[in-house]
Structures are given as structure tokens and as C-alpha cells.
Amino acid sequence: MFNLTEGARTAEHTKSEHSSARVRAGARLIFIYKNRSARVVQTSNKCLRIQESRERCEAGQHQNQDKISFSKSPTLLMVLDFKNGTLLVSMELKETYNKIAEDWVRDHDKDTWWQEGTDHFLSLLTKKSSILDVGCGGGIKTRYIAEKGYTITGMDFSEKMIDIARRNNPAIEFNIVDMYHVDDLDGAFDGIFIQAALLHIPKSRVLEVLIKTKEKLNPNGLLYIAVKAMREDGTEENIKIEHDYGYEYQRFFSYFSSEEIKGYFNTLNMEIVWEDQKGSNQTNWIQVIGKKKAT
């Protein structure tokens, strides 16, 4: 149970029911979850985003708080939808993927939209190259790359997803690691593959993750990114409520433009060597490959 407060107003929420508190965007909030606190780190007319802090803290009344820093990366990400003046409490993404892991892997095992871009990425590497699959989920694409003759390691924050990946691919190394902590992995890699993973983190933290990721690349190493393209209505971030598997679950998504993704590579001082957009169902996937400079 946790409390969301603005002055004397309080909403309490458990997994079995949803409650809400009427608050305004930019309000001073204290969010308490399992005896922990968190602060608002971004505010808009549509949503408030909060991140766990190790110490009790309050959010300031600022519209741009993406520069707030923590001594440690948060272990909890919650997003609060702001609709008609009401904040509706959302979810923790890791819990969601642990819940849907078996169904998700079964549902996505036959997807093919990603193969062309993945093959192009691999064509730029030698068979002796070492590759890291960030946000590997159940290891579907990790296995595909391994079967092409490459040495690959997978990492994901979902324990259930990694259990499935290890069960289905016992010869491949998989690690339970959040992408915020990619720098905790030992060694460096010739290629890093981040497909459909960055889209689950706030845009305000993407560069933070990519800076750490670049540090895990060897000189002349390649970084592949695939994300969902910006929606026609201009939505940049949202919470999607789904019922695909006969039960309700929610996921947070970020949406990008090609210019944004290329801008990250430019900020990282990496050379863009390939870019493409690929449609699948009603989703356009932006794919970009960048090369780390030797010096």
C-alpha cells in the first residue's frame, strides 16, 4: 500500500483496486511505496513521472525536473497518468514482465519485423565478434544471433524472462541486469544490440543509459538501437493498458523520432553507419546503427 499526497489529500492503492487523488500538474507531491519515498521528475499536462529515492524527498513546483539526480539509480519506475485533473496510479514494469513472461514469449516467437535490421547489424561484424543483447527478454533474438555463429550474452531485468531464456538456450549466458546498470557487467563487447528495450524507459533517462552502454563497447564497436516511432498524435510517452492474454496488464512506452535517435548518436560522438524504418502491424520501428570511434 502507498500514499500519494498533496497537502491533506491522499489516495491509497492496492493491487486489487485503483484509487486516485485530484492534483494538478506541477503540484508538490510525496509518494510513499513500501516505506520508500519518491519524487516527481517530470511534469506535463498529461502525466507525472516519479522515481524511487532512498531518502524521503519532495518534488518541487517546476515543469522541467529531468536534471534531478540520485546517488543510485532507482529500482522502481512508476508513471502517473494525468487525465481530467485526476492522477491514476500505474505499475512497475518489471512486475508486469514477470507476470506476462510466458505468454509474451509465446506470442512474439514468430515475429519477423526485426530480422532484416538484425542481419544488417551482424553483417557489419565478424563471426569472432562478441555481442551483448540488452533487454533480451526471453532470448528469442539472442538465440537467432547465436545460431548465426556469433558469441552473444543476454541481459534483462525480468527474472522470469531470464528463466525462460536460460531454459530455452542453455548454451548462452544470460544475466539479470537492469539496463540502468549495464556498466555492472564485466568486459566489453564488439557489438551491443538494444532492440525494443529503450522504449520502456523515460526519454529523460535514455542518454544516461546510452552513455553507460557506449562505455561497454570496444573501439570501433557497433551499437544497434530499435525503438517505436512517434505516434501521429504526437504522443511521446504513455501507459498502455492491454488484455492480450486474458488478463489486464500495463506497460510504459516512449516514442521517438528519427532525429531524436540520431541526435543521441551525435551526442555520443558516434558515427551513424545505417538507419531504416520498418513497419509491422500498426507500428513503425526506427532502427539506427552507430560506430564508436577508435579514439
Image (spheres, rainbow, N blue to C red):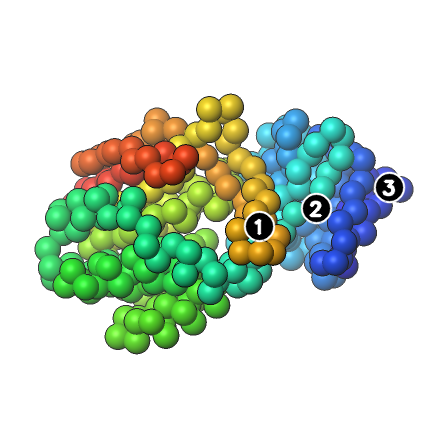
Mark 3, mark 2: which one is toward the viewer? Answer: 2
166 horizontally vs 24: left or right: left
Q: Label 2: which residue?
A: 89
Q: Is residue 31 above or below residue 163?
A: above
Quarter placement of the N terminus: bottom right
Q: Secondary structure at mark 1?
A: loop
Q: Residue at x 86, y 41 (%)?
A: 9
Rendering coords of residue 78 (x, y %): 62, 48
- Mark 3 → mark 2, Cα distance in angstroms: 15 Å
Mark 2, mark 1: which one is toward the viewer? Answer: 1
Q: Residues within 10 Å of mark 1 (few under 14, many from 20)?
A: few
Q: Residues within 10 Å of mark 3 (few under 14, many from 20)?
A: few
* Residue type indicated by callout 1: His
Q: Is residue 262 above or below residue 120?
A: above
Q: Residue at x 64, y 34 (%)?
A: 47
Q: Secondary structure at mark 3?
A: strand
In the displayed orientation, state which residue is furthest to the right.
8
* Residue type indicated by callout 3: Arg
Query: In which quarter of the view is residue 5 placed?
Result: top right
Q: Label 3: which residue?
A: 9
Q: Label 1: which residue?
A: 243
Q: Residue at x 45, y 58 (%)?
A: 104
